[in-house]
Amino acid sequence: MTETKRYDVVVLGGGAVGENAAARCASGGLSVVLVETDRFGGECSYWACMPSKALLRSGHALAAARRVGGAREAVSGDLDANEVLRRRDSFASHWNDSGQVDWAEGAGIEVVRGNAHLVGNRAVEVRGAEGALRLDANHAVVLCTGSAPNLPPVPGLDQVEPWTSREATSAQRVPSSLAVLGAGVVGVEMAQAWARLGSEVTLIDTGSRPLHGMEEFVGELVAQGLREDGVHLRTDTSLSRVTPEEGGVRLELQDGSSFSAQRLLVATGRRPGTEEIGLETVGLRPGEPLSVDDHGLVRGVDGRWLFVVGDATDQPRLTHQGKYAARIAADVIVAAADGTDVTGAADWSTYTATANHGAVPQVVFTDPEVATVGRTSSQAEREGYRTSTVDLELTVAGAVLHADGYRGSARMVVDEDRKVVLGVTFVGQDVAELLHSATIAVVAEVPLERLWHAVPPFPTISEVWLRLLENYGM
């Protein structure tokens, strides 16, 4: 007989997004159970954000030292790959999730490990090592089931055991050579990380430049940085066939060329984790991103009880945006449990994920870094805004001091009707630390005439704000 337990809220998916949803509901006084199939802490903790940035950081630090006279002369040798991997392992907690479990239980969240799927209105069944368990929710079920690598239908791919982002961030040895298919965020970050660790890397993409969804100059500067690290860029082509061979894999490209590599990393995007979680039992189609409103409620389900946040949605697939949406959804659930309907709350309230529309920050942790928030110039134009665009080389005093021969660029997109910033993009060493100021400017819709009075300290890279406003005409 299946045991049944009842909670106020049932959360499926124990990654960063699910943890935030569960903790926020628990702090609001609700009983919460958090269900995870694999490791509590999820993709970000073990195979994405944390280990990937740990792999990149050592190479960035070495490159930064070599850019500064006096430090440059003190640097000898290359990266110690074994030490980089050892440090990476520590940031992935050696793939042990006991610390995450302890945190959840300490926050008043009950944890259950097993495969979960919906079995009807406010009902979930979990199958684990100890059998089946039914979880009934008094108020809400929150789906935080993430995403999985999306492998393209390339002939022979199933015969060569390709790396996905999981293998690329957890590998214990540096491959002698690595082919990377896809020049999106995962592709460019992992291409640079492994190249700096000593692998011969070839990056393949159908576009003319990396990161082609961002401002054009972004891809140009990142491509330059990759080439300087020895990465071979094969653009405007794709993979037509792969075959296993002794010591690796043979890759045939659509342009007729071919080459061999010890490993192949497929970084061609991700698909939502909405398969095999019982969506059909509530009238939804498995395998597709779930459409949600700004409160996290799934569209197409009656009763205002099913929420979804994170990569399984049609919203921005970034860890920080998922955590933001999780906090919003939890606040909606807590309010509803107290008898307050907030589903008509205004934009920018604590119950509405307004930032997902035009105020999303993102960092690509390559060298040079990419930091962007809001709309690109082309997005703003497509959406009908009347805009001005200000472009600037990052040659302010703070940047010149930061590194000898500092190279970087910035773009600010201005709404000419309201005189506010719609979007900002920075490319350069350590520009990620500029991003929150840009995010505040976009989210708060700070008028340019007021932004002019936010004086950047001298000499910092933040001086770029003064130069952008001066070039605009302030």
Image: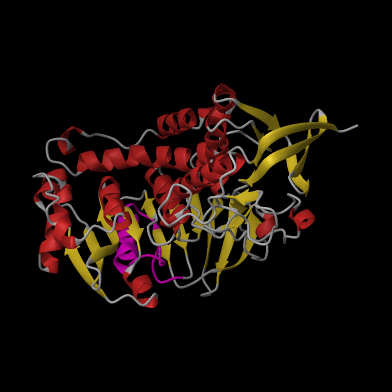
Q: Residue at x 73, y 49 (%)?
A: 277
User: Is 221 displayed left or right of 454 in the figure?
Assistant: right
Q: Which residues are magenta?
A: 207-231
Residue placed at 73% from the left, 35% from the top?
114
Along the line of sight, the residue nearer the viewer: 160 or 54 = 54
Counting the numbered discs, the total is: 0
Q: Decide which of 386, 224 is in the foreground and name it.
A: 386
Percent of width and height locating residue 229? 33, 52
Q: Quadrant of the N terminus?
A: top right
Q: Is residue 469 above or below residue 278?
A: below
Q: Is residue 216 magenta?
A: yes
Percent position of residue 261, x then y: 53, 54
Residue 56 lies in the magenta stretch:
no
Location of residue 56 (image quadrant):
top left
The percent position of residue 173, horizontal first and vertical second, equals: 51, 37
Residue 360 in which image quadrant: bottom left
Looking at this view, is 418 or 189 the one in front? 418
Q: Is residue 97 left or right of residue 472?
A: right
To which quarter of the image does residue 233 belong? bottom left
